[in-house]
Image (cartoon, helix red, strand yellow):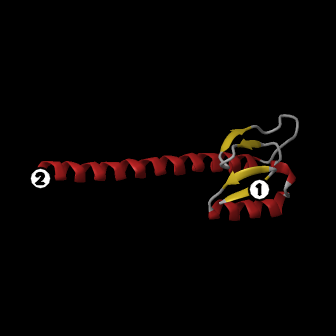
């Protein structure tokens, strides 16, 4: 699901969003502003905490963890496509060999 967080689009899982809400209760909305950049699909493209403004490590860890999880989900989707293509190829080879 894509949510607006820190003035950025962010693609989060349900669990990640629930954890974000807990962080928001503890720290407010402002600490994440400017800490990361994302693309139109809500994928984090860079994490850049301010060197002049102290940031809680749990917030940095959260953003890095979301970025990592997004990439793993994308990679998992790629693997599923490869498995699907492989099974389709096996079926086609079987049909060709039967004819």
Left or right: residue 99 versus residue 64 is left
Q: Quick one: SS at disc 2? A: helix
Tell me the tag on residue 4. Answer: 1
Tag 2 near tag 1, CB within 8 Å = no
Front residue of 85 and 60? 85
- Place of residue 29 in the rendered image (x, y in percent of width and height, measured from the top left): 84, 56
Distance from Cα at disc 2 to Cα at disc 1 = 54 Å
Left or right: residue 54 versus residue 70 is right
Front residue of 93 and 59? 93
| Picture quarter with the N terminus | bottom right
Q: Quick one: SS at disc 1? A: strand
**Going 84% across and 57% down the picture, which residue do you hit?**
27
Q: Which numbered mark, 2 or 1, is in the foreground of this view?
A: 2
Q: What residue does disc 2 label? A: 98
- Place of residue 8 in the rendered image (x, y in percent of width and height, measured from the top left): 77, 49
Identify the mark nearer the N-term, 2 or 1.
Answer: 1
**Going 30% across and 52% down the picture, which residue do you hit?**
88
- Place of residue 33 in the rendered image (x, y in percent of width and height, measured from the top left): 83, 47
10 Å neighbourhood of mark 1: few (<14), some, or many (≥20)? few
**Going 75% across and 63% down the picture, which residue do you hit?**
21
């Amino acid at each position: 699901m894509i949510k607006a967080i820190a003035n950025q689009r962010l693609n989060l899982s349900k669990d990640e969003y629930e954890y974000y809400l807990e962080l928001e209760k503890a720290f407010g909305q402002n600490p994440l502003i400017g800490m990361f950049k994302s693309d139109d699909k809500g994928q984090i493209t860079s994490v850049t905490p301010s060197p002049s403004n102290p940031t809680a490590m749990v917030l940095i860890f959260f953003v890095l963890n979301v970025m990592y999880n997004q990439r793993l989900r994308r990679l998992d989707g790629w693997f599923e496509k490869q498995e699907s293509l492989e099974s389709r190829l096996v079926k086609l080879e079987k049909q060709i060999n039967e004819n």
